Image: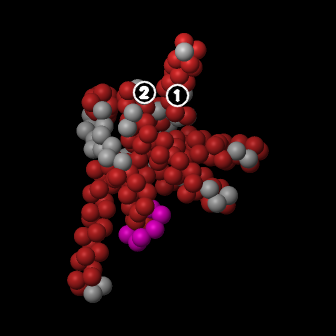
Amino acid sequence: MKNALLFIFAMMTWASASSAGLLYNYSQLTLKDLDQMNALAKKKVQEFKKEGAIEILKEAVQAVYARPNDDGMVEKVITPLRTELEAQEQWEAVMDALVQEAIGALKNPKAFKPVVQNTYAIFLENLIADFKPFAEREGYERRVLRTIRDAKIEISKEAVNERKLRTMKNHKSPSEIAEQVLSALTKAEAENKKTGK
């Protein structure tokens, strides 16, 4: 019994300590400029070509989307990673796994430090913004937005305070943001039907 409890504790500690596999948290990523982010993406693509492990590209995609995107950097940096993943037919699988990882962390805030929770929240916020133009039609991107909305994520008080302290910004739950995007799309579709567009 004691050994079983020790094993469970060790696994929980490992999961928490590993920050669920994050390369960097959002506050570290904020300090990286375009050249540094491009260098990170390029390095990971080279590592992938040498080792062939999808996990390498997955880590890099996560880092790109987890960097606050006030300067529109995501679209400037993501292309080589996406191209490589699409060539392996792994883009959707990797994005699904990363979305589930982020949702899992945000639904279990006690296991993760506030800075890690916010890293996952920013990841989802950036993903929603990136997928929004493609969600106008039924398909993969809209399905991902529904997954985020239906997760009913609530941001912990600790995460809200941590982000306010670092960025002076309040933030909504990614589920609320996804809900707003999907509602706007549904409304636009209803208007288009009415006007016969």
Which one is earlier in the sequence, the residue at label 2 or at label 1? 1
Judge whether residue 166 can be spotted in this image: no
Whole-percent x and y of residue 194? Answer: 22, 83
- What residue is rendered at 52% in x and 41% in y? 63
Is 48 on the left or on the right of 69, as rendered?
Answer: right
Q: Nearer the viewer, residue 6 or 189?
A: 6
- Quadrant containing the C terminus is bottom left
Marking on residue 111: 2
- Which residue type does callout 2 highlight? Ala
Q: Residue at x 23, y 85 (%)?
A: 195
Q: Which residue is mark 1?
A: 15
Q: In the structure shown, which secondary structural element does the residue marked by tag 1 occupy?
A: helix
Confirm or deny contact between disc 2 and disc 1 (CB under 8 A): yes
Query: Viewed as shown, does residue 103 lie left or right of 194?
Result: right
Tell me where residue 80 sits by quadrant. bottom right
In this view, which residue lies farthest toward the right?
Answer: 50
Residue 94 left/right relative to 25: right
Residue drawn at the location 38% of the way across and 61% of the way down = 132
Q: Which residues are magenta?
A: 136-141
52 or 150: which is nearer to us? 150
Label count reads 2
- x and y percent of residue 191 in the render? 23, 77
Which is more toward the observer, 60 or 93? 93
